[in-house]
Image (cartoon, rainbow, N blue to C red):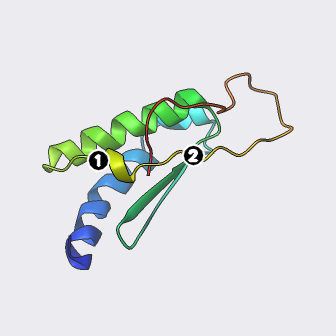
Amino acid sequence: MTPLLFILVTAFIIPAIEDDPEITKASQGRHRIAAFMDDIKTHAPTKKAAEMIKRKLEDAAGEIGLTLNVEKCDVYVRSTSDRRNEEAVEEIPFCLR
């Protein structure tokens, strides 16, 4: 994908995730999404929020004819001592990137 096309695509996808009220509620407003070069990185404090972002990312990409390349997908988990939420992301059975 050319850089210009990627910018145009992410200009559609990023706001769809950033402004989603259900994702905002599930993540308590702590979800993030960033696009750089040919990657989209998402961050969420809970498994539920991460799953919602994944679905929204797939749906938004699908609306413009794109799919996620699962061979390039990764999940990174950061351990934290903050255990206020039992749904803290420990294992996510899908890809985000």
The front one of 27 and 50 is 50
Residue type, numbered disc 1: Leu
Badge nearest the viewer, 1 or 2: 1
Rendered location of residue 14, percent (x, y): 38, 55
Q: Left or right? Give the position of 27 relative to 18.
A: right
**Please, what secondary structure does the residue beneath circle 1 have?**
loop
Residue type, numbered disc 2: His
Q: Is residue 86 above or below residue 12?
A: above
Q: Is residue 14 above or below residue 29?
A: below
Give me the residue at 69% from left, 30% from top. 88
Rendered location of residue 73, percent (x, y): 41, 49
**Please, what secondary structure does the residue beneath circle 2 have?**
loop
Q: Is residue 70 above or below residue 25?
A: below
Q: CA distance from mark 1 to mark 2?
A: 20 Å
Rendered location of residue 1, percent (x, y): 20, 70
**Which disc, if any, is residue 50?**
none
Give me the residue at 22% from left, 46% from top. 67
Q: Left or right? Give the position of 65 relative to 72.
A: left
Mark 1 and mark 2 in contact? Answer it, CB < 8 Å: no
Q: Is residue 66 above or below residue 95?
A: below
**Which residue of the protein is positioned furthest toward the bottom in this rendering?**
3
Residue picked out by circle 2: 31
What is the crowding at mark 1: few (fewer than 14 residues within 10 Å), some, or many (at least 20)? some
Rendered location of residue 87, percent (x, y): 67, 24
**Which disc, if any, is residue 68?**
1
What is the crowding at mark 2: few (fewer than 14 residues within 10 Å), some, or many (at least 20)? many
Say whether disc 1 or disc 2 marks the residue closer to the N-terminus. 2
Name the quadrant containing residue 38.
bottom left
